[in-house]
Image (cartoon, rainbow, N blue to C red):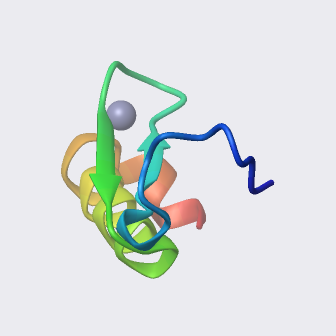
Amino acid sequence: MDSPDEPSPPRTQTITGQCERCEWDVVAESYPAMVKAYQDHLRESHPKLWLRT
Ligand SMILES: [Zn+2]
């Protein structure tokens, strides 16, 4: 995954999460943080989906 040609600093890795059901997306500093934000989004915007997770 690491490329010597990649200009972005390695310590500022961010995770981007997207919702499959709408245009929502989020940028988080870690995978757990992204998951938490996504769960919060599901709960608020797609409560039926949230209940299924
Ligand atoms: Zn959504």
What residue sits 33% from the left and 19% below the top? 23
Of residues 20 and 16, which is closer to you in this image?
A: 16
What residue sits 80% from the left and 54% below the top? 1
Of residues 30 and 45, which is closer to you in this image?
A: 30
**Residue 41 horizontal/vertical position (percent):** 27, 52
**Residue 24 horizontal/vertical position (percent):** 30, 30
- Which residue ends up furthest to the right in the rendered image? 1
Name the quadrant of the C terminus. Answer: bottom right
Of residues 8 and 51, which is closer to you in this image?
A: 8
Q: Quadrant of ligand 1?
A: top left
Q: In the visual, does 6 lie left or right of 31?
A: right
**Residue 35 horizontal/vertical position (percent):** 45, 68
What residue sits 74% from the left and 47% below the top? 3
- Residue 5, above or below 49: above
- Residue 38, above or below 7: below
Residue 46 picture quarter: top left
- Which residue ends up furthest to the front in the rendered image? 4
- Which residue ends up furthest to the bottom in the rendered image? 32
- Residue 3, above or below 12: above
- Which residue ends up furthest to the left in the rendered image? 44
What residue sits 19% from the left and 52% below the top? 44
Q: In the visual, does 15 lie left or right of 53?
A: left
The mark total stands at 0
Of residues 49 and 7, which is closer to you in this image?
A: 7
